[in-house]
Image (spheres, rainbow, N blue to C red):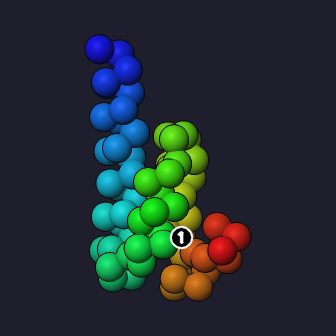
Amino acid sequence: IQQGIQQGMLQDARDMVLDALETKFGRPSERFKDQVSQIHDRLRLKEILRMVLKAQDIEDLEKALGN
């Protein structure tokens, strides 16, 4: 049960990152979606969410992420 809860929380965190990105910059690229789907650390996803909120444009975000 605990593992299922953790998986749900992880998926929610991924969805929040992608929703924030889409709201701020438009539909995310498939490459970015794939990168986010491979992250298994909620703290890292939280960090990326903050980066999305702070970025002025998609290029700023890519720089912050090292892409």
Towards the viewer: 36 or 24: 36
Instruction: Please indicate whether residue 11 sits to the left or right of residue 35 in the image.
Output: left
Query: In the rendered image of this protein, does residue 56 appear above or below residue 32?
Result: below
Q: Percent from the top left, x then y, of residue 5?
A: 31, 25
> How many numbered tags mark residues here?
1
- Residue at 38% x, 27% y is 6
Q: Is residue 24 above or below residue 13?
A: below
Q: Could you tell me which residue is drawn at 66 percent across and 74 percent down?
A: 67
Image quarter for residue 65?
bottom right
Q: Is residue 64 above or below residue 14?
A: below
Crowd class of label 1 (few under 14; some 14 to 19; many from 20; radius 10 Å):
few
Q: Is residue 17 left or right of residue 46?
A: left
Residue 13 on image: x %, y %: 39, 46
Tell me the kind of residue under disc 1.
Lys
Q: Residue at x 38, y 20 (%)?
A: 3
**Does 13 sit left or right of 40 as displayed?**
left
| Res. 5 visible in picture | yes
Residue pointed to by mark 1? 54
Please state which of residues 51 and 42 is positioned toward the viewer in this rendering. Answer: 42
Quadrant (top left, top right, bottom left, bottom right) of the N terminus:
top left
Secondary structure beneath label 1: helix
Q: Position of residue 58 (x, y in %)?
A: 52, 82
**Which residue does the image show at 40% across and 59% down from the upper left?**
17
Tell me the quarter of the picture where residue 10 sits.
top left
Q: Nearer the viewer, residue 56 or 10?
A: 10
**Is there any visible trace of residue 24 in the rendered image?**
no
